[in-house]
Image: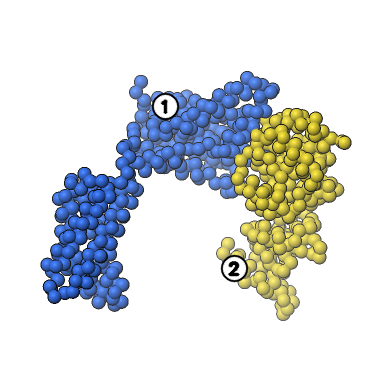
Amino acid sequence: MSIKQNFSADALPDFRNLGVIARVLLAVNAFAFAAALVAEPAWGAALDRFLRAAALIEPILLATLVALYALSPLLARLAYWQGCAAVLALALALSGSVHVAMVPADNEPAALLRSLALAAVTVASLLAYLRLLTKAYSPALAEARLQALQSRIRPHFLFNSLNAVMSLVRRDPRRAERALEDLADLFRVLMQDSRSFVRLADEIALLERYAAIEQLRLGERLAITWELEGAPRDALLPPMVLQPLLENAVYHGIEPGTGTGTVVVHIERRGARVLARIENPYFEEHARRAGNRMAQANIRERLQLFFDAEARLGSRVAGGRYLVEVEIPYRPAEA
Amino acid sequence: MSPLRVFIADDEAPARERLRELLADIAGELPNEVTGEAQNGLEAIERLPPSGARVLLLDIQMPGMGGLEVARHLAGLATGPAVVFVTAHDRHAVEAFELNALDYLMKPVRAERLAAALRKAAAAGPPPKQQLAHAARQPREYLSVVERNRIVLVPVREIVFLRAELKYVTLRTRGAEHLIEEPLVALETEFAERFVRVHRNCLVARAAVRGFERAAGGEEDPHWNVVLEGIAERLPVSRRQWAAVRALVRDA
């Protein structure tokens, strides 16, 4: 899967898109109504003024939209700012002609100028609004969001791990070496491209590397039970979905305790779904203070970007244990 | 010069090990000896006083009790240790240390920095209580009483009421009573979530309030007494606090 697309800077809105047309119609009328309300304090009078204004505004609006619809392919060829200028010129020309045609000739030129100024302001605001809208829904933004959501390892973990490795350097250089290899692997994955799927087997290997480092640091305080017999190792999933959950389990379930705590990692396939569950001892006080919603909200959003509504992430407390569960559709990697 | 007596408190064995190694490395320029170790906050409180340590290397993130709270209780000792906080990464804590002029080291610790921090801390002595209190971001989980160079901890959640009496504050749990030397106003601010003021001189645990009875002798102030769970003694509610206290119970 890829949500990567060419990132083009700014582009004119698609004037043949129903959504764009509807937004323009609504916005202009709302703008006119608001102006009428500002001018006339009484509702009746305001409505009256709005209707009178509409008699002039609607023809201009419709003429402009039809013209833009027709010229859309030509406009699309211009650079963004040139396109904006063209749209503005078109709207002004049409406003001017409709004004001259509909308002009696004896009217002073100031009224025409006012109409043109209003048209210019309206066009400029609409273009700015549509530009923001395009940006908000662009694939480039979705990609940027995914990058930003790329899970990060807690600095707490990094520095404590480095500290633990340093304590090994003199006593047990071999073990120190292995721990640094594990850390390197972990960071390699962390800095990888976050847009492609990984195999469950790789994510499990990552969990094991991470666990080895934590074990070094926490010693007998950390016991991990791996229940991976039913895990479909060829399943595809977004990278770094399970590791942050295991990191959370250690941070919230083991570190606040003085004794030994057990973390269970359970992964299995259930028909067309893959289910992963990580559980740890629950410390109410700690949970209340720290709150680990960040990592979970982050993973949930990433799952959504990858699987839309097909993935699920939930957590609950049961019998003094904290359980977090991830469910994703089973999509095997091609062998 | 006699060696500097150092105590190490950190929940991670490798971290303690590393500090020991570094202390050995700098022993040439700064003679020192490790007089004890603790792997959590409660252990540090229990073991430090008899160890005679002059400087405590104190991890701030520990199970049971965090480093900052440990330091606050140790500050009650007549001859408490100087404290050098150690942290891997805690921006908020570091900001608080900077702001309150408390000494700290970042993990992984460097030998030169360790030597400098120890020298400075040994010269300066124990950190002032006030600075520690300012650096704390959370209320303590315990209040402490020092009895002959031993620190007795009373869990805050077990306290039923706190009453100011002349120089001291009486701290009452279901089973015991202690005198502590802290102003009631400061306690009220720190534990606002847990205690409510019923009288000029008294804070009671919100969770312990069972109800109210009309005080005997009706006419004069106070009119009502508060009934507390697990304690026979009735405490007067002042007229001034009555509305607030009653509303609180009604809401519960």
* Residue A28 pos. (x, y %): 25, 62
Q: Position of residue B175 (x, y in %)?
A: 76, 53
In this orientation, which residue lies closer to the viewer: B159 or B134? B134
**Taking A223 as reference, is A55 left or right?**
left
Q: How is the image coloured?
A: by chain
Q: Nearer the viewer, residue B65 or A85?
A: A85
Picture colour for chain B = yellow
- The 10 Å Cα crowd at callout 1, few under 14, some 14 to 19, many 20 or more, is some
Q: Helix, strand, or loop for circle 1?
A: strand
The quarter of the picture where the C terminus of chain B appears is: bottom right
Q: Colour of chain A?
A: blue
Instruction: Kindly identify which numbered label has been placed on residue A306.
Output: none
How many numbered discs, if any? Answer: 2
Taking the image as shown, residue A237 lies to the left or right of residue B5, namely left
Q: List the single residue furthest toward the bottom.
A: B219
Residue at numbered disc 2: B247
Residue drawn at the location 25% of the way across and 65% of the way down: A117
